[in-house]
Image (spheres, grey):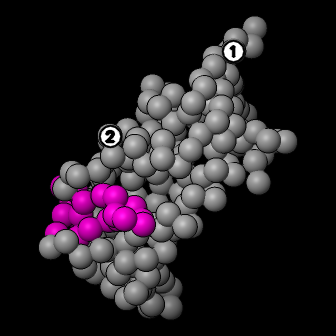
C-alpha cells in the first residue's frame, strides 16, 4: 500500500528516481532459472572481482545493451528484455505490473535529499525545500514513457560463488527515470515550496 494515507513518498538525489524494482515473472530468467540467465547474458566483473558475473548497463526501449546484447521492448502483454537473437530473456507481465503501478503511483510526493557521513558511524540526511506532487496516473502513461526512452531499466543482477561452493544470484531490476521526466507519468504535476 502507499506509504502515508493515499500518498507514496519517494526521496531521491538529483540524478535518477527509482520508480519500482520488480523481479521478472517470465522469460528465460523464470523458465530456465537465474543461473542459466547469468551464464548466457552476463559478463565478467569489469572491476576485477574474481568469480563474479554481472548483468548491467542502462537499457532503453529499442536500444541494444552494449555489455549484454539485450534490448528492452514492449510486447503485447509484457515489458520484454530480448536477447541478441530475439529470444525473451526476461519479462514483466502487464497483469503483474498494472495493479502495483496504480496502487503505488497514483499519488506520489517526490523529495530531493542530500546525505553525508555523520559522527559515530551515522548517516545524516537533509531534504530539499520543495516537494513535487504527481497526481493521477495511468498504466498507459508508464508504457508511453518506456517507449519514449524516459523510463529505462537499470539492472544489476550479479552471480558469485557462495561459501558452500554453490552459485548465488542476487537480483536487482530497477525501472528508473530522470527527475525532469517525472511529469510525463501524471495527469497533474504540482510543485510546493516548503519554506
Point out the stretch of residues depicted in magenta. 65-84
Disc sitting over residue 148 in the figure = 2
Judge from the rendering whether residue 54 lies leftward or rightward of residue 107; answer left or right.
left
Which quadrant is home to the C terminus? top right
Rendered image quadrant of residue 84? bottom left
> Is 152 above or below relative to 55?
above
- Is residue 33 in view? yes
Q: Earlier in the sequence, mark 1 or mark 2?
A: 2
Mark in front: 1 vs 2: 2
Residue at 24 percent across and 64 percent down: it is 70
Q: Secondary structure at mark 2?
A: loop
Q: Is residue 42 magenta?
A: no
| Of residues 61 and 38, the one drawn nearer to the viewer in this rendering | 61
Circle 2 packing at 10 Å, graded few (<14), some (14-19), many (20+), is few
Residue at 40 percent across and 87 percent down: it is 31
| Of residues 132 and 33, the one drawn nearer to the viewer in this rendering | 132
Circle 1 packing at 10 Å, graded few (<14), some (14-19), many (20+), is few
Judge from the rendering whether residue 19 lies leftward or rightward of residue 69; answer left or right.
right
- Is residue 10 in view? no
> Is 139 above or below relative to 53?
above
Judge from the rendering whether residue 96 lies leftward or rightward of residue 150; answer left or right.
right
Residue at 34 percent across and 58 percent down: it is 74
Label pair 1/2, CB-CB below 8 angstroms: no
| Of residues 3 and 73, the one drawn nearer to the viewer in this rendering | 73
Residue where numbered disc 1 is placed = 192
Tell me where residue 151 appears, x and y as whole percent: 41, 43
Q: Secondary structure at mark 1?
A: strand
Residue at 59 percent across and 40 percent down: it is 137
Amino acid at each position: 500500500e502507499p506509504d502515508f494515507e493515499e500518498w507514496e513518498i519517494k526521496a531521491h538525489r538529483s540524478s535518477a528516481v527509482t520508480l519500482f524494482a520488480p523481479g521478472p515473472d517470465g522469460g528465460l530468467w523464470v523458465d530456465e532459472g537465474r543461473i542459466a540467465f547469468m551464464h548466457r547474458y552476463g559478463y565478467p566483473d569489469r572491476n576485477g572481482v574474481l568469480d563474479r558475473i554481472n548483468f548491467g548497463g542502462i537499457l532503453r526501449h529499442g536500444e541494444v545493451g552494449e555489455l549484454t546484447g539485450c534490448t528492452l521492448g514492449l510486447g503485447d502483454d509484457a515489458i520484454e528484455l530480448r536477447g541478441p537473437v530475439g529470444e525473451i530473456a526476461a519479462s514483466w507481465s502487464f497483469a503483474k505490473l498494472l495493479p502495483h503501478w496504480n496502487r503505488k503511483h497514483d499519488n506520489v510526493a517526490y523529495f530531493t535529499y542530500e546525505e553525508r557521513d555523520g559522527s559515530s558511524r551515522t548517516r545524516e540526511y537533509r531534504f530539499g525545500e520543495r516537494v513535487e506532487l504527481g497526481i493521477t496516473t495511468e498504466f498507459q502513461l508508464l508504457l508511453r514513457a518506456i517507449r519514449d526512452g524516459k523510463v529505462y531499466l537499470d539492472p544489476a543482477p550479479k552471480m558469485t560463488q557462495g561459501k558452500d561452493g554453490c552459485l548465488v544470484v542476487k537480483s536487482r531490476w530497477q525501472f528508473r527515470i530522470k527527475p525532469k521526466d517525472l511529469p510525463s507519468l501524471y495527469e497533474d504535476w504540482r510543485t510546493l515550496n516548503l519554506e
